[in-house]
Image (cartoon, grey):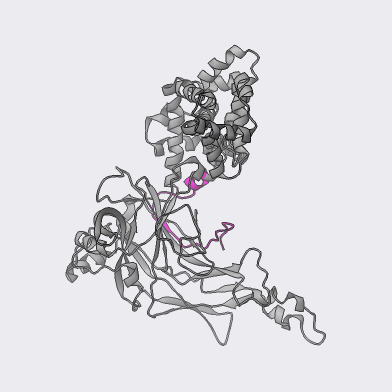
Amino acid sequence: MVAHHIDLNAGLPCGMVAGREKDLWPLGQSVLVFATILAVTAGGLGDLWPDGSTAEAAESGFRKLSPGVLTVIPSDTSGDDTEIRSDLLEVTKGRADRIWTPQEASPNTTLVERAKNREYLPDVWCLEFAYKSPRTIDIDVPVDGKKMKRKRVWYLIYRVKNTGGRRTVIDKTDPTKRTTEVFEKPVLFLPHFVLEGLEAFNDDEGMVTGLAYLDRVVPSAMDSIRQREDQARELFDSARMASKEIAPGEERWGVAIWEDVDPRIDFFSIFVTGLTNSMRFRAKAGASFAKQEPVGASMEQTLECLRLDFWRPGDANAGAQEMSVGYAGLFERITMGTRLIEAMSRPPLLKSNPVAALDQLGLQWSDLLEIPGSKLAPFEKVLRAVLALKDPAQRGPVMQTLFGDLGVASLKALLQALSEPLDAELEAVRMAGMTRVGLSKEALKAKPLKSLADVCKAIDAIADTAQRRSLAEQLFGRDARRLDALAKDIAIARTFAMIKTIDADWKAITAGSPRAAFAGLQDVIDAESTPKLRNQMLEGLFGPKGPTLYAAATSEHEGIDHSWIFRYENDGSGL
């Protein structure tokens, strides 16, 4: 089961944030919330439809929804979170200096011993949550005082229902006998919605990180959304939803709204916090439990959070678009399938032959694996191998065989960018970069390929991504982007070589969709029974993250499934 990781340490931003930033959540203390996965396919939504809801909607005067439009997630009625055992760490760790062995009483009667393995029996409530697939709508929003601006917003229509809570009851005569008791009480729902894209839009962001957006209160959007969805039904934004408790048995309809969402996002998840008060806690990393600290200062809490996966199978610019329900692993399957199709389709287009070129250079696919934090290392290794050829006349043809026409053009552009005449200001910038990497004009002129390899090594030695990019732009100007293009060509060459090595059916891979390509290769991967060899295959196909991506792609089956999981950000381990 794949879990979401979000840190809730700082204040609330006013707009979009990149990646999983610490300022996504409006809490003043360090509280970590992590997510569960709802893996749902569009084809199975009808099974979740409660039979009485349609008739009830018609009788109440609200718009009648077709079966399958509303996905209902029942409240969590398991009892595992109503019985929690933990040490009272403020005593067991904070007063460890007071550990002693009594002479006339049992050792377990001391304060420290009695604070160990304490049992907590909290009353736990969980709201029933139902939703319609997210949609987009174009509205006019106020900007700069009285001006109005047409803007596209994303929104999610949902319904919450107070179905009661549960507690563990211990028999007074026999403490070993325990039962779960249902209780009713008003619940204050404090909705917290985060929409997070899964795609990254440049290599530096990684393969599965993206952008995150916090739900906003947009009064000007409420009427337009209600007119589209159901004019007769009252919709609550997040502020109004949190203003009044939900009585037992009461249900309430709400809408979560996101502004300025990047239109390139196709795969995204929505994380819903506040549906339950169920939580876990533990000591913070490096906690000291100093005597002067307030109680709880060295602890961190994890709340239960629901994750809903979606994707957009269409034109990102289409208006009033409705998203499709996804499932855990869908993004990874399509991402990996796309890489397979690209690896098999690109060489014929570029007129390249990576397998033959690597053979001439004496390189294996494993020589082209990216080093963590050093994505130019494979490109540098190829340049060194080209320089090692005994016959210098072979260098040009081998590069042509490996990279094709476009790659060779990029290579020439990089060398030209290092040596072409520039005006005084730009020349000063370039010379500063060359001095930084220890490169002289004389060395560049005498050994251009070696100089380029040395530059790649120097850029990779810089840990900070922004500084690496800055140095590359100093040296190559606008052609710096060609470094990323050539690094990608090397990765594709490695994937192509691995597909040929494992003798996969490349015609089947390129004949269908990315999901079909992944499914075609999955049989080959799963047929390898040795875990070490299977991981090697995945690394060759998809890089060092291949085994992790494959595990995420195959850990969930298409279909209806949801669960609640507690996980911590700093180590990814569940409780």
Residue 111 locus on image (x, y percent): 71, 82
Residue 438 locus on image (x, y percent): 65, 32
| Range of residues picked out in magenta | 549-575
Q: Is residue 475 above or below residue 60?
A: above
Residue 176 locus on image (x, y percent): 59, 79
Query: Residue 428's quadrant in the figure?
Result: top right
- Tell me: 221 left or right of 564: left
Q: Residue furthest front?
A: 424
- Tell me: 215 left or right of 571: left
Residue 22 shown in magenta: no
- Tell me: 151 left or right of 177: left
Q: Quadrant of the C terminus?
A: bottom right
Residue 314 locus on image (x, y percent): 30, 43
How many discs appear? Answer: 0
Pick the front one: 561 or 339 = 339
Query: Residue 458's quadrant in the figure?
Result: top right
Query: Residue 380's quadrant in the figure?
Result: top right
Name the main secondary structure of what is drawn in magenta.
Answer: loop
Pick the front one: 575 or 145 = 145
Is residue 528 visible in this depiction of the protein? no
Is residue 56 visible in this depiction of the protein? yes
Residue 556 shown in magenta: yes
Q: Is residue 173 above or below residue 58?
A: below
